[in-house]
Image (spheres, rainbow, N blue to C red):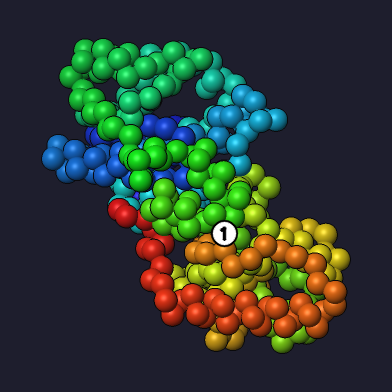
Amino acid sequence: MLVLRDDFSSFKGQTVLTVGKFDGLHLGHQALIRLVRERATALGVQAGLVTFDPHPAAVLRPEGAPPLITPLPDKLRLLEQWKLDVAAIVTFTPHVAQMRAAEFLEYVHSGLRPRAFVVGPDFRFGYRREGTVEFLRSWAAQRHIEVHVVPPVLVDGERVSGSRIRALIAEGDVEHAARFLGRPPSISGEVITGDRLGHKLGIPTANILPRPDQVVPANGVYVTLVEQNHTVHPAVTNVGVRPTVDGRRRQVESHILDWEGDLYGQRITVHFLHRLRPERKFDDVGELVAQIRRDIEAARDWFCHHEHRALTGQM
């Protein structure tokens, strides 16, 4: 997948495009991308996506910006796995926020030469969201460009949305969030060296610090899969501050079942499948260790009775 940022002049082909923030790359976004690929194949051009980094809300109203479901590196990894040809990133700045709808379309058109756009019914763009689907249709018709509008995706009668997914993850309801995402919610990061308490207790963990701008599951213990270098391991993961040992910083600690090795300094992704319990403070370390061992057995039992979802969604 070709990744472009801001300057699209080096791109020489034609495209079918979808445009948006695409935080989460949930089932609604996947429906757009699926049609982009279908139309690109039919027209003999490249399948492309235009997105923004940072999230526009982080620039326009930073105090109220929503935490990210999929930071940019994870977003690009998924898009490549989903066989997109081009990912065009627009650095969202106050200048971009001031671009009128027609100016933004000309900017995209001059570099990526779309033959078709694929958007949702609520698609809005440009200064103060003045650009609508109707505006896009009118602008595109003058240039003989197709516009396809994909209806919202419903799961159990509920519309799939990023705000709903964020709320579910923050509550720890990772299974419900996965139904909207089409895959388990996940957090990626580099394994850090901590106080090695897990090793001292005989239950080693791979620890990562969540990004401050990413939504993190509620503190607690989860059944997870740990992915490292395209290999996936069953695991049990604690999210929290470790109150029993007076922990201070919130981190994600994963004990990989039946595995030995050193992951320090390596990048891993933790996929959250099921919440076992909330985090709690125990009277002493011995009681904590006994509970961790019960958590490990509960995770083993869960894996015996469940098939996990595909980690890359339904594309």
**In the figure, is residue 180 to the left or right of 109?**
right
| Residue 196 drawn above or below residue 95 | below
Q: Secondary structure at mark 1?
A: strand
Q: Residue at x 51, y 15 (%)?
A: 128
Residue bearing mark 1: 188
Q: Is residue 11 visible?
A: no
For the point 41% across and 68% down, the residue is: 308
For badge 1, the amino acid type reads Ser
For the point 57% across and 59% down, the residue is: 188
x, y (%) of residue 121?
Answer: 33, 26
The answer to whether residue 103 is left or right of residue 228 is left
**Count of numbered circles on the image:** 1
Q: Residues within 10 Å of mark 1 (few under 14, many from 20)?
A: many
Asked which quadrant contains residue 198, the reply is bottom right
Which is nearer the eye, 136 or 165? Answer: 165
| Residue 230 position (above or below residue 312) | below
State the residue at coordinates (61%, 24%): 60
Residue 57 percent coordinates (x, y): 59, 29
User: Is residue 92 visible from the viewing direction of this image?
Assistant: yes
The answer to which quarter of the image holds residue 34 is top left
